[in-house]
Image: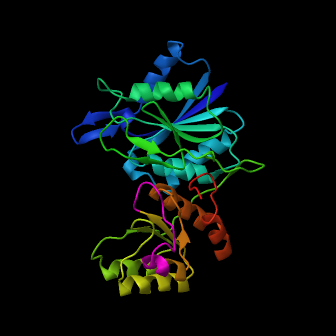
Amino acid sequence: MKVLVIHTGGTIGMVQTAHGLAPKKGIVEDHLFKLLRGNRIQYELDITVADPLIDSSSISPDDWNWITYQISVRYEEYDAFLIIHGTDTLAFTSAALCFALEGLEKPVILTGAMLPLAVQKNDGLRNLADALDAIYFATPGVWVQFAGRWLHGARVYKSHSLAFDAFCSSSPNIPPRRIADNFRRHTYQVFNVPVLTMVPGMSDNVSLTAAERADGIVLRCYGSGTLPNIPALSDALKIAQRRDIPVLAISQCIEGGISLGTYAASTLLQETGAIDGRDSTVEAAYTKLLHVLSSATSERGWKDALNTSLCGEFVG
């Protein structure tokens, strides 16, 4: 068995500097080699390292493209792929990979740490070892191994900013991969996609500016899909409809998702053609919207894709 480690950066490989923690080459690599020398790993392991290493708060679609490129050009050579990643945007990257790697028939596992390997009592060594062990039983798809938990890559979200057990996900029966006859890598292009969160007393200018300038909008609604009764918001959604840009509606609630039509306060979403994101996480909704804008060639194409669960990102 051969495994490719793709080291992007993140806390796990950071050291203390005068300006705070920052990525440093060699930290993760040295620990992997120690595990190899100690017979902790019973398969062949190769490593490719991002240059420069990335603090995950700076991750962009270009970095997702770099990761998927490393997988695609080496797809036939390796049996599994392990991605070392910072925790702040790990859930965005795992969702992005789920959409980008169509026809994936091998495991892709992401892990990282809340404390660097270079400090005592860190969680990085355990997460690294657990992810390497998981390769033996992992099924095809994009998974997150963190704090002893095996998490669905299209439904994972960061739930704690400090605790070692920082991630959660629900586990539907649909695996985190896009089924297809052949492996195909999709790339992400750059689009103007804001995430608008409904709040009491929100400014009129925010929604109107988004509707007039955005390529698509993720709309984080209240509860099961309700909106404030604000004329400017109504005008904004009608502008988005006239411009034929996708509006993907999700709930601010972690569980349950939205159900358009339950309340009169959600009627506007239906009238203006907003897409029901069901129980998608904000990470999955945002990356999926970028994916369909990058891939779809028509309005019908992005509507069909957004209404379809491509890799278990929503249920129902």
Residue 264 included in the magenta stretch of the image:
yes
Principal SS element in the magenta part? loop
Q: Along the line of sight, which residue is nearer the eye, 16 or 252?
A: 252
Looking at the image, residue 206 sits to the left or right of residue 297; the answer is left
Q: Is residue 297 visible?
A: no
The region drawn magenta spans 252-268
Question: Is residue 111 one of those drawn in magenta?
Answer: no
Say how many tags the image has: 0
Quarter occupied by the N terminus: top right
* Quadrant of the rendered image containing residue 148: top left
Residue occupying image coordinates x 71% and y 48%: 103
Of all residues shown, which one is farthest toward the top? 38
Q: Position of residue 112 (x, y in %)?
A: 43, 36
Can residue 100 be seen in the rendering of this structure? yes
Q: Position of residue 236 (x, y in %)?
A: 43, 83
Give 297 or 170, whichever is nearer the viewer. Answer: 170
For residue 47, which quarter of the picture? top right
313 above or below 202?
above
The residue furthest left is 18
